[in-house]
Image (cartoon, coloured by chain):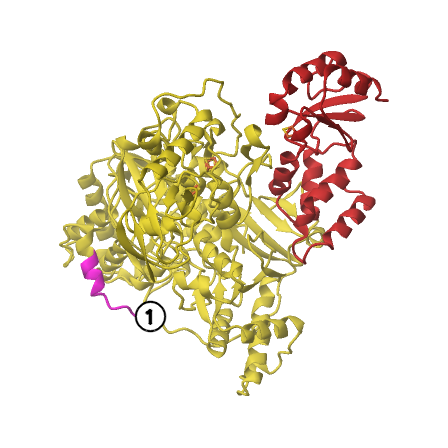
Amino acid sequence: MVEIEIDGQLVNAEPGEMVIAVTDRESISVPRFCYHKKLSISASCRMCLVDVEGAPKPQPACSTPIAEGMKIHTQNEKAVASQKAVMEFLLINHPLDCPICDQGGECELQDVAVEYGSDVSRFSEGKRIVAPSDIGPLIQTDMTRCIHCTRCVRFGNEIAGIMEMGATGRGEELKIEPFLAEGITSELSGNMIDVCPVGALTSKPFRYELRSWQMSSIESIARHDLVGSNLYAQTYKGNVKRVVSGDNDAVNETWISDRDRFSYEGLSHENRLLSPQIKVEGQWKEVEWDVALDFAVKGLNRNILNSRNMAKLGGLASNTATLEELYLMQKLLREMGCENIDHRLNVKNLNNTIHLKSTMALADLEAVDYGLIIGANLRLEQPMINHRLRKAQLSGANITALNVKDFDYNYKVKSNAIAPSEIANTLAGVLKILLDKAQQELPEYLLAVSPNKQTVELANELLEADNSVLILGEHLINNAQASSISNLTAEIAKLTNSTTLNLTATANSIGAQQMGFVPNSTGMNTNEMFEADMCAFLLLDIYPEYDFHHSATALSALSKNDVFVISLNSFSNELVSQYSDVMLPMAAMFETSGTHMNIDGKMQSFSAAVSAPGEAKPVWKILKVLADLLELPGFHYENSAKVMEGISHQSVQSHEHDTSVNLGDRTTLVETIWMHSPYQSDVLLRHADSLSVSKIGQINTASMNASTAKILSLSDKDSYLGVPVEIIETMADQCVFVSSNQATNIGGLK
Amino acid sequence: MISNNAKKQIDSWITKYPQGKQSSAVMEALKAVQAENNNQLSHDLIQAVADYLDMPGIAAAEVATFYENYNHQPVGKHIIRFCHNISCMLNGADDLILHLEAKLGVKTGQITKDGLISVKKVECLGACVGAPMFQIGDQYYENLTTDKIDEIVDGLK
Ligand code: SF4
Ligand code: FES
Ligand code: FES
């Protein structure tokens, strides 16, 4: 710490930090355009000039390091004169189109111009015009407004990890543009809108909608992944009009993924379920809430309660539900005596799952020196977790991936394309080497395992690292050796002092587990329910053609004539109306208060930004009234916060897991991993139009290498399980990786 | 897209920089590739150079569009690179450019019908002391006048 003087005040600062960081901390305002606290310093706009005593010329505050005894003036004549001069230069070419500019009212240039600009321009020549470039459906460009601060360029280079924008030309001809005709494709691209200080890059879906001051900004939490990014929902007359990022260094720093930013568009989709409906003699009838709930209760009475057959009732929920919703629903079911409760819908075999515990805090991820990613396309599946790991790699960590495909990583990854059936064997090989080195006894199942080049390398990498993380991803969820992989990873972590991240179930799945939204020992899981002879179901926001692994079985179980199905849904869906007897419209994301639990176990609560459309109601209210009608005790909640108080008293049951390891071999000629493409992972996303026409939203491929295609007698003009074939050599042999933006090919997957 | 000959030249430039800094050779690489492609760089050629040097296409494009010695449109056998920066401008460059255009019957950026000459306006070439000036090939011509221009241009074959 040294002492310096700013505008006559004594201030403590670290030597070497930049003047602007100190003035920001001390709330002394210094105008700036190119400086951004999370980006490198370019010192190109010169707006931040301040007077430093002893320096002959004014110095840019963003790139002048603090030194002992410095005396800085941010407001004296010299500083202000320089700032005004820079402003005058910047305005020479800036258009005067604020009245039609979407940035108007939240424009850094406008704000600074009010303070430092002059009323009259001394520049009478023509202003330059730069043609806009079409960079995709998410970002609107108006490049005449660009002031060449290069924040967007640096964002691409430093944060998104792909340099897509650049400054071409020179002098008066200089312009910021992408090089590739496909425009901007990063999964974090929307942050360029936030960093652009002017109206050159604005939100395309929001274009010409509203002025920033007409909207209210409501803090909220994104629920599409395991991070729970902090953001603001900006609303007007009961609609979410735009989403911008919020700051939280422990969670999303200051960035949000495009998925979190643009999903709100789905809220106003015409497919929203807007009124309660009941099915009478095969015909759907729109009714009042009390009629619908009464109908639901009567149905439950008839099918279940009168015969006291709780074992024939099942409750399933989507993992996008809030903690409160999940808690209340399991409480309702358990109060009725029902133990058939599950949120794990897309798992092939629920007795064979990845049950590894996550032991790493998100913010610590950037400090690891080694990371092993198994079965995840992190960049698209968990963009903010990937961002942290990327930071670790950039500061020197080695990252290795064991994936079925050599994905497009945005940092240096040692990638080994590996068949899903080889993962358990590979981990077993690594474990054997580690145990040998530690001179520990080998368990039975390792005796026959022989080390190979790859396992030796992996073991060495792990042993050399001081702070390593093992990451298990979504592609493992239906791996034939899931449980073994989980156990092997836990053993390896123990021997190498590694931390672990289990990313196999996303959104609010960790919360669902914590809320006990899984069957206890007497209950049935999702798959068992569909095999059993059930009489009634209570379903929370479920869309069978997307959500279930066994979608055909699920559909036929739900569609049986004598099964009474109560569906709470945010969107209407043909299959849901086929099998349901009552459909209750529910509030979606941004429309309800609640809590999300992220990978750290951090609980983040949010309030409703808008109210639900039509007759739709928040789920906690629906469940509460339903419980009251069923005369169940303990549902006297006035709001969702009261539910939360109940939750903190909830004791979480821990589940016993099979700790055995089976090293199976490949059983099929060709192995297939089926994933929803990243912008199709929940129902709101599937209705977000701009996202779905973006480059990532359009991903719909069954990737395989040429030799696999030959085995399957397919060419890149064919489709596989209804998905267009992509022949690409970065795939493991005899494997297909499907990333589909369509419904599961019902019955197509075994 | 890049010929073996050009690759050889690029490789030898790469060795002049520390390992992993191969993108530092971008200027010479663009030059070598341009020389083999009618003295002109297309979008695809720039991308090919970028790929060869393992750098983003836009980063190579930034370089290729910054310097005047890369051409993005067809050019004549001789390129007259006329400086129009401050010193030359103050010494009458603008009028001389008009004169040259009239004499050749082409505008800046165009090629004479016989394909012999094209004119390009460039930024300061560091010869302000002899302003106004232009460059043809490696040769600087300074203290230009209309007569001097006529004589130089008439001598071009
Ligand atoms: S587009 Fe915006 S962020 Fe990018 S350089 Fe221009 S003003 Fe800066
Ligand atoms: S903010 Fe300091 S030079 Fe741009
Ligand atoms: S301004 Fe023409 S050479 Fe310098």
> Does A264 lie within the magenta span?
no
What tint does the image give chain B? red
- Highlighted range, magenta: A644-653
Q: Nearer the viewer, residue A458 or A672?
A: A458
- Lateral position of residue A680 relative to residue B61, left or right: left
Quarter residue A10 falls in: bottom left
**Residue A646 part of the magenta segment:** yes
Q: Amino acid at mark 1?
A: Ser
Q: Reply above or below: A10 against B149.
A: below
Q: Is residue A440 above or below residue A539?
A: below
* Quarter-of-image position of residue A402: bottom right
Q: Which chain is yellow?
A: A
Give the residue displayed 36% in from the left and 35% down from the top: A108
Q: Position of residue A325 (x, y in %)?
A: 26, 53
Left/right placement of residue A479 relative to residue A334 reads right
* B113 up-or-down from A426: above or below: above
Image coordinates for residue A230, horizontal then vertical, percent: 33, 49
Quadrant location of the C terminus of chain A in the rendered image: bottom right
Q: Does any portion of residue A538 appear in the rendered image?
A: no
Q: Which residue is mark 1?
A: A521
